[in-house]
Image (cartoon, coloured by chain):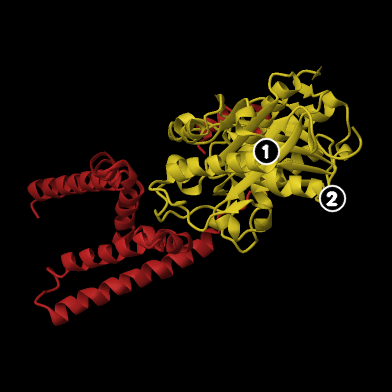
Amino acid sequence: MLRGHRTWEFENKPVIISSATVGGPFEANGKIADDFDLLHEDLWLGQDSYEKAHQVLLEQACERAIEKSGVPKDNIQFLIAGDLINQITPSSFASRTLSFPYLGIFGACSTSMEGLALGAFIVNGHGAKYLLTGTASHNAAVEKQFRYPTEYGGQKPPTAQWTVTGSGAALLCGEGMGPRVTSATIGRVIDMGMSDPFNMGGAMAPAAVDTLEAHFKERQIDPSYYDLIVTGDLGKIGHDVSKELLKKHGIELSEEIYQDCGLMLYTDDQPVLSGASGCASSATVVYGHLLNRMKAGELKRILVVATGALLSPITFQQNETIPCIAHAVSIEYGGGY
Amino acid sequence: MSSNKKKKLTPVQQQYQQLEKNKETKRPVLANSIKAFLIGGFICLIGQTIQTAYIYYFDFNEQTAGNPTVATLIFISMLLTGFGVYDRIAQFAGAGSAVPVTGFGNAVISAAIEHRSEGFVLGVGGNMFKLAGSVILFGVFSAFVIALIKSILIQWGGF
């Protein structure tokens, strides 16, 4: 079960029996629009506030995942969810609608994999038969929380990233058909003294590298074990920096197998500067695009390292540095287990 | 970053920040300055046109045409903000659209729109000057200081 210091290997290999993703208008024009289950034309989603729209995103992803699995709603035991808004209200409010026993978590943009790791741990230990985990982010609601008003004309530097409007949810079960969660490495909080909130990728890269290193060491595997290793939302700069750091630490990864979810969502001509960020960056790419590719047989083993910057608008105004975290979860499908 | 802050960093942190700095896409300062100069100048040109129009077509002179001109520019910036265009211009123009009075208008209006969902009193009213408030505060304060210096010089200097 526990391997090394902070890696869990799940001997029962919980199965992701279904997953669903929801996206907004910007994502609908992106690179992987076909992999979304539901795309919204309107950023408001027909609600009267962005916060409510944020909540609806998560509700819809959860409902769609349940629908796709065919499992009766009453059979689902727990929901593990989180987001970036104060007091994680969108997740809690969505749980009010869905009315599952609920565990709210906060891991900033690493929430997706934090939820999947915890969920897999619970299912693996027979703590639940069916467990749902998901996360969401909404561009306007999150920007309002962390930055300036959405319509404010402040010029963003090239290191800034674009918060994804979207949501992803996965339904875990102890048995069944589908991609399996095989292991998870929990991240440490790493702070390299970076303090620019417009350069999250640069701040988060060392956390991703730390978790990756620990994962390979504790599982005693070579990076080549995986067909694809993706980070959550490092963006262009974070991705380059993390590659350089890995190289320094003796881990060489090629551009084909080491990628970033934040660079997979949007086309090059979309004005996202350094790439995508937000809880939904890793959630939508992994629970949609990557699981679809696994089911199509393109990928057998993937490792997802979701990265999160654990800052608040108050801490950066008080000149605090940005502590970061990254959680890694491996997902395998077809043969080899 | 101040050198004071740098001192508190551990060697590992310093080393990392050095590496990160090399990979970072720099702000294109020269290109940004040129864009800001051109767009800022263009906004001023519009302002000048409006002012001249007020003087030419209405009963204003050079002193009194200032207020309606500013009001018109703010009105235009309000419309552009409401239609979601101003922030796009700003991403291109930078300081060019932030420094003129239209930027001030945009700061007020964008905050008002943003917090409409929290109601008129606590939302719009309470947050409208969230960004522009410090401009008003320090603008008034520095005007006060300058006025004070001027008065003192006139009193004592005798000119």
Q: Specify the chain shown as red.
A: B
Residue that badge 2 annotates: A298
Mark-to-mark CA distance, 1 and 2: 27 Å
Residue found at the far bottom of this picture: B56
Q: Which picture quadrant has residue B95?
A: bottom left
What's the mark number on residue A114? none
Of B53 and A65, nearer the camera is A65
Q: Which amino acid does label 1 sit on?
A: Ala
Q: Which amino acid does label 2 sit on?
A: Glu
Q: Can residue A16 be seen in this view?
A: yes
Of A267 and A330, nearer the camera is A330
Q: Are marks 1 and 2 in contact (CB under 8 Å)?
A: no
Chain of the residue displaying label 1: A
Q: Can residue A282 be seen in this view?
A: no
Q: Specify the chain shown as yellow.
A: A
Query: Against A333, is A211 above or below?
Result: above
Q: Which mark's residue is nearer the viewer, 1 or 2? A: 2
Residue B65: x percent and y percent? Answer: 15, 70
Residue A100: x percent and y percent? Answer: 56, 28
Q: Which residue is drawn at 81% across and 28% down?
A: A13
Q: Which picture quadrant has residue B75?
A: bottom left
Residue A226: x percent and y percent? Answer: 85, 40
Chain of the residue displaying label 2: A
Residue B155 is left or right of residue A74, and the answer is left
Residue that badge 1 annotates: A205
Of B46 and A258, nearer the camera is A258
Query: Against B130, is A315 above or below?
Result: above
Query: Against A170, is B113 above or below?
Result: below
Q: Which residue is drawn at 48% across and 36% down?
A: A90
Of B118 and A120, nearer the camera is A120
Secondary structure of the residue carrying tag 2 is loop
